[in-house]
Image (tube, rainbow, N blue to C red):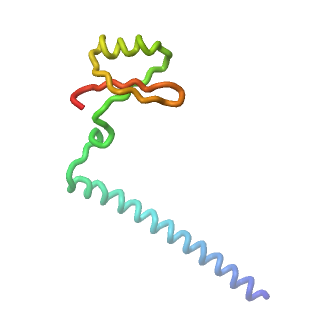
Amino acid sequence: MVGAGIKGTRCQKSGAGLTILRMRALIHACVLLALVVPVAAQSGSPVSLASLSTQPSMNVFRRFAVEPAKMVSFYGEVLGLKPLPSIKLAGGEMIQFGVGTT
């Protein structure tokens, strides 16, 4: 019985040793990745943040209630935007206007 206790203790110590080795390997992998990724990114085709985070359209949201006729008049007549077909929603309607060439 004493031998089993000692053997179990050895397993626990070696298990902790494996955990430390795994952590060191993970840290080394992260450092290597941090060094390699910027070099690989520079050698490929450049991709800007703007090209990844923009879209060829604009969304405008109102945070206050406006009569639909006044809103259509403002965006259409005052700003000169082209009206697009509206979309019927469960709670109302989404009024759309075109901006630019698309």
- Quarter of the rendering containing residue 38: bottom left
Q: Name the residue at 28% across, 35% down.
A: 56
What residue appears at the point 35 percent right and 12 percent down from the top-left corner?
74
Count of residue discs: 0
- Residue 32 is situated, as x and y percent measured from the top left of the image, at 35, 62
Q: Position of residue 48 (x, y in %)?
A: 26, 43
Question: Residue placed at 49% from the left, 30% from the top?
Answer: 89
Residue in view at x 32 percent, y 26 percent: 84
Closer to the camera in the image, 1 or 80 = 80
Q: In the picture provided, is 25 more to the left or to the right than 18?
A: left
Instruction: Report x, y in % for residue 58.
Output: 33, 29
Q: Quadrant of the N terminus?
A: bottom right
Q: In the image, is 75 to the left or to the right of 6?
A: left
Query: Does 92 sit left or right of 79 as displayed?
Result: right
Q: Nearer the viewer, residue 50 or 42?
A: 50
> Residue 41: x percent and y percent?
26, 54
Asked if 58 appears above or below 35 in the picture, the reply is above
Q: Which image quarter: residue 11?
A: bottom right
Residue 54, placed above or below residue 36: above
Q: Quadrant of the C terminus?
A: top left
Residue 76 against residue 89 in the figure, above or below? above
